[in-house]
Image: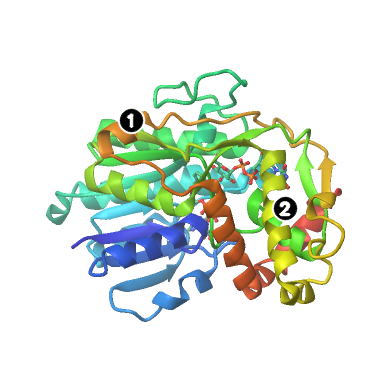
């Protein structure tokens, strides 16, 4: 039986991981530490509240004393560190929070682990798993080979730079203090509970609301898309059998340019709207189901400053060493995700009110 501290467990990937882990290892203790920023939502974990072995703590990872007390109180042997500021656009508008949470917060957590795990006898067996991103490697040209674990770091946005710094700290704590650490650098995730400021959920929601679908630049930027369930599976394999001090790249084997992806979302949603008169009634501003098509809403807008052109993952190491391969196709994963957003209208309407609306109004002149 393990005792896990999951930071950022009320956010998108963190919440998916908590549910994933609970379903597979029901006897493990799960302690979720989350500051509940705009991106964190306790409702994502509502079905677990009050269940034995599940604990939710609202708090900031930057508070080392809190981190330490949770490690001791719950005899934590495994940290899975998701907590971060995660949106590139926000890091361009205001990098401060990214430096604070992603760098200083990771450092506080590492210090807490060093203090507890290298002094307490009970923690002879421990693991600090750090969730990172492929963005630390920078941008690829069209014909460049995909990122491997030895591709030099070249982060381009404040977000990517802050994640790169946190990766280096994790590596250094393994090398210098002997902390048992692992890192995964994953590509673009999508799935349930993703905040509708990221490309896929934003497009789904805007199609339903009949709002413009903002595509940055020429829409030719390429990302490698992975369903969040596959990412959780990859993390599970690393926790089970990853080598101390190792880094593993995780991808979805699914490179696609943004414009094609947005068109694909429009087509799936048009099919849904065409078949379902009730849906058209629920979302009267949506285009599908009438003569117009959702793709008519596509609007090319000013590019993101410093926008990375292409990311691509070489997943050979994790495949050969740990047997991980992604299994959800984009077609299937997108259809499932769209169904989730259709069934959870209350969820996305609730998270898109208040501070989020103010932020959009202040920072995007083109929406
Ligand atoms: P998210 O923004 O949806 O969730 C982040 C969570 O962290 C939120 O619940 C938030 O409340 C919490 N948090 C933020 N600051 C905190 C602090 N100081 N203390 C405690 N909690 C805090 O992010 P996500 O998309 O789920 O990403 C999770 C992790 O995965 C991040 O580290 C991100 O860099 C990494 N990642 C994300 C993707 C992706 O496509 N979303 C891909 C690769 C890696
Ligand atoms: O690659 C992994 C990274 O993927 C994670 O580390 C980040 O946390 C996560 O946010 C994501 O970063 P991206 O910048 O790639 O994701 P985003 O959804 O913001 O954008 C995906 C692509 O779509 C990118 O090329 C920018 C473009 N885009 C995005 C938005 C929000 C648009 O064209 N229009 C939009 O409105």
> 264 left or right of 39?
right
Q: In the displayed structure, would residue 262 be above or below residue 15?
A: above
Q: Where is residue 42 in the image (x, y as percent from the top left)?
A: 51, 71
* Residue shown at the point (36%, 52%) measured from the top left: 80
Which quadrant holds the N terminus? bottom left
Tell me which residue sits at (35%, 72%) in the image.
55
Q: Position of residue 198 (x, y in %)?
A: 64, 51
Quarter-of-image position of residue 30: bottom left
User: Relative to residue 192, is residue 317 depicted above or below?
Assistant: above
Residue drawn 77% across the image and 62% down it: 358
Query: Which residue is nearer to you in this view: 90 or 177?
Result: 90
- Residue indicated by mark 2: 266
Please report contact status of discs 2 and 1: CB closer than 8 Å, yes or no. no
Location of residue 334 (image quadrant):
bottom right
Q: How is this picture coloured?
A: rainbow
Residue annotated with mark 1: 317
């Amino acid at each position: 039986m393990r005792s896990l501290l999951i930071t950022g467990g009320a956010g998108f990937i963190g919440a998916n991981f908590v549910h994933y882990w609970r379903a597979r290892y029901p006897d493990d203790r799960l302690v979720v530490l989350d500051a509940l920023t705009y991106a964190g939502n306790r409702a994502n974990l509502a079905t677990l509240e009050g269940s034995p072995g599940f604990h939710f703590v609202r708090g900031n990872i930057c508070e080392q004393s809190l981190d330490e007390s949770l490690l001791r109180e719950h005899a934590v042997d495994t940290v899975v560190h998701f907590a971060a500021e995660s949106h590139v656009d926000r890091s361009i508008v205001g990098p401060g929070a990214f430096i604070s949470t992603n760098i200083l917060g990771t450092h506080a957590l590492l210090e807490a682990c060093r203090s507890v795990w290298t002094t307490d006898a009970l923690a002879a067996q421990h693991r600090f798993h750090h969730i990172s991103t492929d963005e630390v490697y920078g941008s690829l040209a069209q014909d460049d080979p995909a990122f491997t674990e030895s591709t030099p770091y070249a982060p381009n946005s404040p977000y990517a730079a802050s994640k790169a710094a946190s990766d280096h700290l994790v590596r250094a704590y393994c090398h210098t203090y002997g902390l048992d650490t692992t890192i995964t650098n994953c590509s673009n995730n999508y799935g349930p509970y993703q905040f509708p400021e990221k490309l896929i959920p934003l497009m789904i929601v805007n199609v339903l609301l009949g709002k413009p679908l903002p595509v940055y630049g020429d829409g030719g930027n390429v990302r490698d898309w992975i369903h969040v369930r596959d990412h959780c599976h990859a993390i599970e394999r690393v926790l089970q059998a990853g080598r101390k001090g190792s880094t593993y790249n995780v991808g979805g084997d699914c490179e696609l340019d943004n414009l094609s992806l947005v068109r694909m979302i429009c087509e799936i949603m048009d099919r849904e709207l065409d078949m379902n008169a009730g849906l058209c009634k629920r979302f009267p501003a949506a285009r599908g189901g009438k003569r117009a098509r959702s793709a008519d809403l596509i609007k090319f807008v000013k590019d993101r400053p410093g926008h990375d052109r292409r990311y691509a993952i070489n997943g050979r190491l994790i495949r050969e060493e740990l047997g991980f391969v992604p299994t959800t196709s984009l077609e299937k994963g997108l259809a499932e995700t769209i169904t989730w957003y259709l069934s959870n209208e209350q969820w996305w309407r609730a998270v898109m009110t208040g501070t989020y609306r103010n932020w959009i109004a202040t920072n995007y002149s083109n929406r």
